[in-house]
Image (spheres, grey):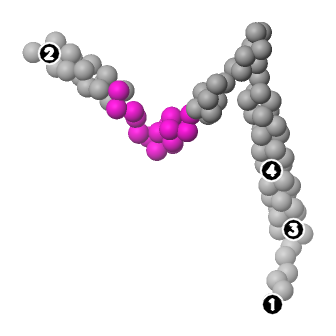
Amino acid sequence: MIKRMTIEEYQIRMKAYSLRQLDEEYKLHKLAWQINQAQAADKKGKAVYRRFDDFFNFKKMEQRILGTRPEDEVLKDKSLSDMMLKSNK
């Protein structure tokens, strides 16, 4: 079954398609930039990024998205809260 659409709906769909295409183009350009950065070298010719984690820290990004924190940060906050409790006594 073929549905009909209004001119306005067609224009909205075409705009959405164009925006999706723009997103894809952005991703390609970002990838090219990242490849360039990954191959970067300092003045001595040594690689700026020795390990992939130096370039992209997956765990850190994942924790930011999920709203979790590494254990050392939690311990830091706990020691701070302990100090605050002691000072309020």
**Spatial distance from mark 4 to mark 1, Cα to Cα?**
31 Å
**54 to 6, vertically: above or below:** above
**Spatial distance from mark 2 to mark 4, Cα to Cα?**
54 Å
**Spatial distance from mark 3 to mark 1, Cα to Cα?**
18 Å
Q: Give the image quarter of residue 69.
A: top left
Residue type (three-letter) at the residue carrying disc 1: Met
Decide: few, some or many residues near mark 3? Use Cα within 10 Å; few <14, some 14-19, many ≥20: few
**Spatial distance from mark 4 to mark 3, Cα to Cα?**
21 Å
Q: Which mark is residue 64?
A: none
Q: Is disc 4 placed on a helix, strand or loop?
A: helix
Q: Which residues are magenta?
A: 57-72
**Location of mark 2 (residue):** 86
Which numbered disc, 2 or 1, marks the residue closer to the eye?
A: 2
Q: How many marks?
A: 4
Marks 2 and 3, the one that precedes in the sequence: 3
In this picture, residue 79 sits left or right of residue 37: left
Q: Residue 17: image x %, image y %?
A: 83, 59
Can you name the residue that lies furthest to the top here?
43
Q: Give the image quarter of residue 39.
A: top right
| Residue 37 among magenta residues | no
Q: Is disc 2 placed on a helix, strand or loop?
A: helix
**Spatial distance from mark 2 to mark 3, Cα to Cα?**
66 Å
Marks 2 and 4, the one that precedes in the sequence: 4
**Location of mark 3 (residue):** 10
Q: Residue 66: image x %, image y %?
A: 46, 44
Q: Residue at x 58, y 32 (%)?
A: 53
Q: Which mark is residue 24?
A: 4
Residue type (three-letter) at the residue carrying disc 3: Tyr
Residue type (three-letter) at the residue carrying disc 4: Glu
Comparing 5 with 20, the one in front is: 20
